[in-house]
Amino acid sequence: MAETSFNPFPNDSYDTPADTRKSIWEYLLLGTRLSFYIRNFFVFCRSGYLAKHTEFTAETQTLYSYKNLKITESCGGKIHLRGLDNINKVNGPAVIIANHMSLLETAVIHAFLRPRKDFCFVIKQSLLDVPFFGNIMRKLGCIAVTRQNPRDDFKVVMSEGAKRLAEGKTVIIFPQHSRSAVFQEETFNTIGVKLAKHAGVPILPLALRTDFLQNGKLLKDLGPIRRKRPIWFEFGEPITEVKGTGKEEHKAVVNFIASRLKEWGCEVELQAEK
C-alpha cells in the first residue's frame, strides 16, 4: 500500500488550536460520552465497510482517521503531536514500540503516521471477529496472536512480523498485556526489540497518553470521556540497530516512554536496577 499524498500534519509537531470550537453534538447530547461515541461509530462503520468492499487506499485511511481526530478535538480534546520528523529519519520499515492506553491511539494514529509509513499492528486474534473492525485489521495485514500460548504467539510475531517488514510494512507493537493508564515496566515485554533484531530493522519508540478515552467498567470499549486530560503522541529518535541481546535497546525504549509519561503527569512504575 503506497504512502498517501494527503498529509494533514506535515510538520514535526502539532497542537490543537486554542480556538477550536466544540461540536453542536456536545450541547445536544449534554456533554455526555455519546457525543464522541455516536460520531466515532459512524466513522468506524464506514471505514469497515470500505475496507471490505473497496481498495481502502492509504489516502482513505488517513482521511477517516483524521475525521476521528477532529471528532476528538470537537469534544474538547487537546491533541499534541511531537517528533513526527523522527519517522522520516527511518528509510524503510521499522518496528514501532509503544505503550497502550486506549482505543484512541488506533483510531487517530493513521492521520499522522499513514502519510509517512505503511504499517500494521500486532493485535489479539479475537479482534478479527469484531464487525467492521476486523475488516480494517485484515485489510491492513495485521498480525493476530491468541494471547493463550506465549510461545506460539512469539513464533507468529517473529515469522509474520519478518514477512511484513520484508514487504516494506512497518509493524506497531504494544508490548503490554492490556490497555492501561499506568505504565508498568514489568509488563512491558521485549518482543518488539526481538522482532527488530530478527528482521534487521530499526526501532522507533512511541510514547502516548490517551486516557482522554478511558476503559469502561462494564464495557471496556465504551468508557467515560475525560475532556480535561491532554492527548499526547511523541516519537523518539530511531534506534538504528539492535546489538547483542537487545537489553540496552529495550531499556532505552522504556526510559523514553517513562520520561515522557512522567512529564505528562501519568503514573509510571519502573523496576529497580539490578
Image: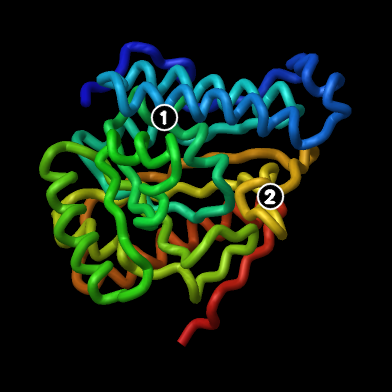
Q: How far apart are the alpha carbons under marks 1 and 2?
A: 23 Å
Q: Residue at x 46, y 87 (%)?
A: 274
Tell me the kind of residue under disc 1.
Answer: Gly
Residue 177 screen position, x and y as percent = 47, 67
Residue placed furthest toward the bottom: 274
Nearer to me, 51 or 108: 51
Q: Residue at x 34, y 27 (%)?
A: 51
Q: Is residue 42 above or below residue 233?
A: above
260 and 191: which is toward the camera? 191
From the viewer's perspective, is 94 left or right of 185?
Answer: left
Q: Amino acid at mark 2?
A: Gln
Residue 91 figure quarter:
top left
Is the residue 55 above or below the residue 253 in the image? above
Q: Looking at the image, which residue is at 71% across and 53% down?
A: 265
Regarding mark 1 in the picture, which secondary structure is present there? helix
Location of mark 2 (residue) = 214
Q: Earlier in the sequence, mark 1 or mark 2?
A: 1
